[in-house]
Amino acid sequence: MIRPILLSIISFPIAAFSASTVNSSSAASQQGVQIITLPDRLRVELNSHLFTEYFFKDVPRPYCYPVLGPGEAPMTRDWPMKSPPDEEHDHKHHRSLWFAHGAINGQDFWTEQGKFGKTIHEGFAEIRSGSDVGVIKSTNKWVSAEGAVVCTDDRTLRFHKPGSDGERILDFEITLHASNGELTLGDTKEGTMAIRLAETMRLKGKVGHGHIVNSEGVHDDQTWGKRANWCDYFGPVNGETVGVAMFDHPGNPRHPTWWHVRDYGLFAANPFGEHDFEKLADATAGNLVVPAGQSVTFRYRFYFHKGDEQKAKVADHYEAYIKSSTGKL
């Protein structure tokens, strides 16, 4: 019988922070990355144009919405933040771009139905604009439906200035801390680093004309549950083909990850759903256990680009990522 993995990665505890570590964007240049503080969210602009907003107050979990790609193409659907008549109103918990998981110490932190856990923002360790990169660092606590703190996290979002062809890059790094006892990230396909794409980019649906491909050359429906270094989902938005590739960092547990990528526009990296993806009898095969007081870190890159994976040279960008300062082990 396949046994759950006992993780032995040790990370430093969450560092204390104060308001003095948070940098104002008031003096930021209009070029590069500007991060503007609003009461319930942070607005991220690239060369004075909106890229996304990071919502953190009074939400089930922090998320980025909207996400605008090359040519300011809206890359994610509007529901449930808005209620447009031409979108499917399914999966309310698919909030644009987010990190969550469906089984953490037996608690559901993925959906928004019944008794579900919430990821509650605690504070910002850093908010920094810059000519090349903007940074958001925050701390959060994962709270069960009964009000118990299950674990905590530190997360860092890095926003890069646009490339020469309008491409946009977001690096997402999160460290989950077993701060309140042993932590079990359970085996379920419901997770984890995720984005829900625009309706026209879907593989199927009333207006869907998208395609999916991964680093192993697998296409469309066949990509679900397969392991790969990266996966790319592309399709038309406002008459132009755009796409997003997600890169799995080589240092992530169980790299290369499995991809929970659906024909209706859900696109997620999930290193835990082993029994679902591999059709195993043992429903705990993919459990990942973090001992009390220790932690585990996951890193991903989102590459928003024009065209399909060939035109966008996704494979080359992945190689550049793992050789960069952000991508190095």
Image (cartoon, rainbow, N blue to C red):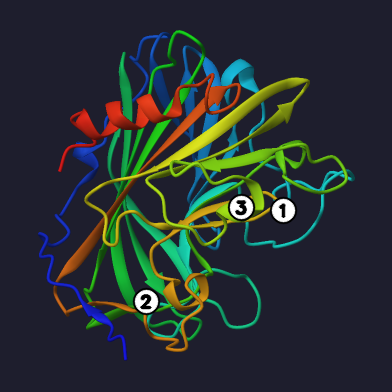
The foreground one among 157 and 287 is 287
The answer to whether any part of residue 269 appears in the image is yes
Where residue 320 appears, x then y in whole percent?
28, 26
The answer to which of marks 2 and 3 sits earlier in the sequence is 3
Where residue 45 appears, x then y in whole percent?
48, 22
Q: Which mark is residue 254?
A: none
Name the residue that disc number 1 marks: 80
The three-letter amino acid code for the residue at tag 1 is: Pro
Name the residue that disc number 3 marks: 95
The answer to which of marks 1 and 3 sits earlier in the sequence is 1
How many angstroms separate mark 1 from mark 3 (CA)?
7 Å
The three-letter amino acid code for the residue at tag 3 is: Arg
Q: Is residue 103 above or below residue 97?
A: below
Res 210 quadrant in image: top right
The three-letter amino acid code for the residue at tag 2 is: Gly
- Which callout, 1 or 2, points to the residue nearer the camera? 2
Where residue 87 appears, x then y in whole percent?
82, 47
Left or right: 135 in relation to 296: right
Seen at 33% across and 26% down, the residue is: 134
Seen at 38% across and 83% down, the residue is: 148
- Which callout, 2 or 3, points to the residue nearer the camera? 2
SS at mark 2?
loop
Q: Residues within 10 Å of mark 2 (few under 14, many from 20)?
A: many
Q: Residues within 10 Å of mark 3 (few under 14, many from 20)?
A: many
SS at mark 3?
loop
The answer to whether any part of residue 39 appears in the image is no
Name the residue that disc number 2 marks: 286
The answer to which of marks 1 and 2 sits earlier in the sequence is 1
Res 71 quadrant in image: top right
Seen at 49% across and 19% down, the residue is: 167
